[in-house]
Image: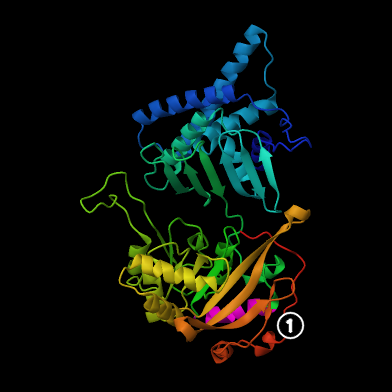
Amino acid sequence: MAAEQMDHARAAVPAEPNGHGRLDAAPAPLDWKVVRRLHDATATALAEELKRRPSLGVAAQQELARTLIQDEIDQLVRERMRSGQAVPSAEDELAIAEAAFAAQFGLGRLQPYVDDPLVENIEAHGFDNVWIGYADGRDVRVEAVADSDEDLVRQLQYIAARLGRSERTLTPASPLLTMRLPDGSRLAAVIETVPRPQLVIRRHRIRNVDLSDLIGLGALDRALAEFLRAAIRARKNIVVTGGQGAGKTLLLRALANELPVQENLATIEKHFELLLHDLPERHPRVVPFEAREGTGERGPDGRRLGEVTLTELVEQALVMNTSRVWLGEVRGEEAWPLIEVMEAGEGGSCCTLHARSAHHAFERLANLCMRGRASVTPEHAYRSCAGAIDLIVHIATVDERWIGGRRHRFVSQVLECNGIGEAGRPAVTEVFAPGPDRRAVPEHDPVDLADYERVGFDPEWLSPGRGHWTSALETLR
């Protein structure tokens, strides 16, 4: 299997800039007309076979497809030999076969990048303006992933129809597409409302991670890890903030992996990204909820048929005998029911939130609460947030690529919420503050220090200089 992936990856080697702003061609490019011919022939034959045997499983379909592809390659070789044309080498045959297989059961020309463990993001601004973001912070422009913009849209439509967990469409009437791929990556695409089709795939490279792992990655130090570990044990409600791609989901995974194995946890997401249910040895009692967009048809109330919202899932989680509710990301009206869960529950709920600073998180949450409930006043929203949230953990991003460096992501600040303060805004204690290099260092003891000590936290970790940041700077996801 590893050899097949290597050959598959060779079919789409990244094209590096040649120093003059142009792209050098990738070595030994595939003949995509041949790949398309094999894909079309295979798809037609598979469709006919499924008519005869509608119960044919995916594994059997894939095995049949490989046989059909090889038959088509053999036919191609015979045709070229008869006409005196050059025939593909054994290595080229394998690359063509893998590309045709990926077009049928995977992501076509995008598949090698999804298979690459070092790739974090894939962006396409049209079929021929494609960029790959790597774990070390590099952004590399690569060769086209389709023959035209129209071909890229056709590929996306095929992917949505075949690989989506539920009904997904990408049409002029439904020009926005967001879906989870089989490997857990998130695909988002837009057509019609933009001059050229736009595509982004965000990959989740690291899944089984805990706070000790994040120390080695340079995302936090020992003192901060010990404090956050105690916060989980003390059932503190935690909001993880940061910008796009800062590593909020990864930190939430690490926090979840500090939970006892017997903990009954509900995760609620628009699209599965935490993927805790994929780690049954760590989370055998997780209840994973995923929102559903519904079909293109609408009922009498204007809602899409079959739609299930995050707000409804938060409410459902409360009757599922779960001890904690973790919301992957707060984006809209689900903020208010989550705050109510944090206020009324046993504690220990967590979520992520896009915010430019830890202090800004309260403004964002209050606005989202008011957006979701017209009856919620600013005073009510701030008071509820202050009563529900225990900690805000902020992840900073420092991009030094402009000066020949790297992009670094790390926890920079931890705020403890201490109820309502002046002007009706939440009062806070800065437990960890940005140090000289912006990385979080102990600043003040939390007001609720006794809660942390009760679960085994040593307050000496809050003494200056106890943490010792590692120099192994990371690339979080």
Dominant secondary structure of the residues highlighted in magenta in the image? helix
Furthest-top residue in view?
83
Image quarter (top left, top right, bottom left or bottom right) of the C terminus:
bottom right
Image mark count: 1
Residue 101 at x, y = what percent? Answer: 54, 33
What residue is shown at x 51% (from left), y 26% (from top)? 68
| Residue 344 on the magenta segment | no
Furthest-left residue in view?
300
Furthest-front residue in view?
423
Q: How is the image coloured?
A: rainbow
Nearer-the-camera pick, 388 or 195: 195
- Quadrant hosting residue 403: bottom right
Image quarter (top left, top right, bottom left or bottom right) of the N terminus:
top right
Amino acid bearing label 1: Arg
- Quadrant hosting residue 211: bottom right
Residue 126 can be seen in this image = yes
Residue behind mark 1? 466
Highlighted magenta segment, given as a residue range: 223-235
